[in-house]
Amino acid sequence: LADALAAEDVPVHRPELGVLVAAVPEDALGRARALDRTRAVDDEKVRLRSAVKSRDGFFTTFCISPYSRYIARWCARRGLTPNQVTTASLLTALIAASCAATGTRPGFIAAGALLIASFVLDCTDGQLARYSLQYSTLGAWLDATFDRAKEYAYYAGLALGAARGGDDVWALALGAMVLQTCRHVVDFSFNEANHDATGNSSPTAALSDRLDSVGWTVWVRRMIVLPIGERWALIAVLTACTTPRVTFYALLIGCALAACYTTAGRVLRSLTRRARRTDRAARALGDLADSGPIAQGFAAVLRGAARRLPALAAPAVALLGAAAVVCVSAFTSFGGPWPVVAAAGYALASGLAVARPLKGPLDWLVPPVFRAAEYGTILVLAADSGVNGALPAAFGLVSAVAYHHYDTVYRIRGGTGAPPHWLVRAIGGHEGRTLAVTVAAALLHERNQGFTIALTALAAALALAVLSESIRFWVSSGAPAVHDETGEPA
């Protein structure tokens, strides 16, 4: 049957069998031989091997998976579920963050050890799901969101611990969260833009495939992008041995280099490929852009003009608007009117960028540019304010907004579409929130703690809105589970 289908040019999926056996015996002797070969297969060994992701980072593959798979089997034999292990991983990470918040050397050492233990459990929950074939929508959502919650809670713990020692590193902690989130948005946007693209003829992709055929280059390239295993190991070791400031400096440098490497490669792939992107990809990028009513209003007005712009106009306009609002906020006096003017210009540029379907070769850069603009504006205004508590409040605000953006990503990857339009309108969109923060800085800069209170109130309102809708959706919607076999995107 497979041969007949192949003869008709029908693609036939032929899975790699490995040690498994598949045969179509034609007589009794062939059947007996096939049965003998089947009985010789060690099913338990195959299940343990299959529990580990086929593609993972160096640290995870060689330092965690060799024993975490046995922890997964131990959990399965005792009736534990992947969701229970995921929750245990979160609790362990929160305890690690609490230890880091003590600001003592024993606390930092305990925090580093517990962070590694949390990562072991994080690997175990997925391996348990694959070992016992327990996949669920709720489990996929918990696994996806808890990873970010654990890492960013740990950043906050390090910042609190540093503050106990008299060192204020909240700006570094917020910068690390902004950089890491923007890295992920680059990965998600690029993957969605090319999910079903046709005609890929990029020489950069061909070079990448050739490098993957050389064993050692595979591991070097996986380590360069600083995936979650390498990143958490770096954070844990530096926490135990150095100070929070050194830890954040190393993390920022490593993530910046990884971001430059991956983004440059993807830009080259996009510029050198001949591909036709689909309406589905354009819709996904539009949803990831998270445009609110202001940008959508400008987009409706500027749609005709946008059609006449060149192919690279959308990311270029978005980048100019983003750079303007961040730079003006950073290099003008806090509380002045110019950041508000720049934010209004950014809203106009954002509308022009999304006024036509995002099908250009570099249009996948639009969502991460928007993320960098919004998060970066909040960061520089909080840092420039000099108001006590402004940076921790900004950390909370960016955490709430980032959760909304991750939630959007995983809904799209699950095939259920973006969050409802009413939610995006209610929380203002990226341009509305950016404008609101600049207005708050201009109006409340002379009031004691006024800007901090505004950021805190905005963070609380956003968190309440996005969390309530997200929990309702993932618990009750019946959306398909997002089963990721490739690991965290680079």
Image (cartoon, grey):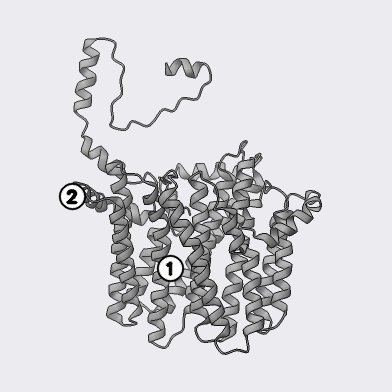
Query: Which one is in front, 303 or 105?
Result: 303
In the rendered image, residue 395, in percent from the top left (x then y), is placed at: 49, 73
Mark 1 residue element? helix
Mark 1 = which residue? 152
Task: Report the mark closest to the observer, 1 or 2.
Answer: 2
Q: Nearer the viewer, residue 224 or 175?
A: 175
Please give the name of the residue rendered at 50% of the width and 77% of the height, measured from the top-left corner.
Answer: 393
Q: Amino acid at mark 2?
A: Arg
Residue 175: x %, y % from top left: 52, 72
User: Horizontally, is 119 left or right of 12 in the view?
Assistant: left
Up-down relation of residue 152 to residue 103 (above or below): above
Q: Which residue is mark 2?
A: 78
Q: Residues within 10 Å of mark 2 (few under 14, many from 20)?
A: few
Q: Residues within 10 Å of mark 1 (few under 14, many from 20)?
A: many
Task: Tell me the quarter of the image containing the N terminus.
Answer: top left
Residue at 56% across / 47% down in the picture?
Answer: 192
Residue 195 lies, in percent from the top left, at 55, 42
341 relative to 299, above or below: below
Type of the residue with mark 1: Tyr
Q: How far is the residue under mark 1 from the one under mark 2?
A: 31 Å
**Which residue is found at the position 56% from the left and 56% from the top?**
186
Q: Nearer the viewer, residue 114 or 225?
A: 114
Which numbered disc, 1 or 2, marks the residue that appears first in the sequence? Answer: 2
**Tag shown at residue 31:** none
Residue at x 31% of width, y 65% of height: 91
Which element type, helix, strand or loop, lies under badge 2? Answer: loop
In the rendered image, is residue 205 in sight? Answer: yes
Percent x, y of residue 317: 73, 60
Residue 253's place in the image compared with 124, above or below, is: below
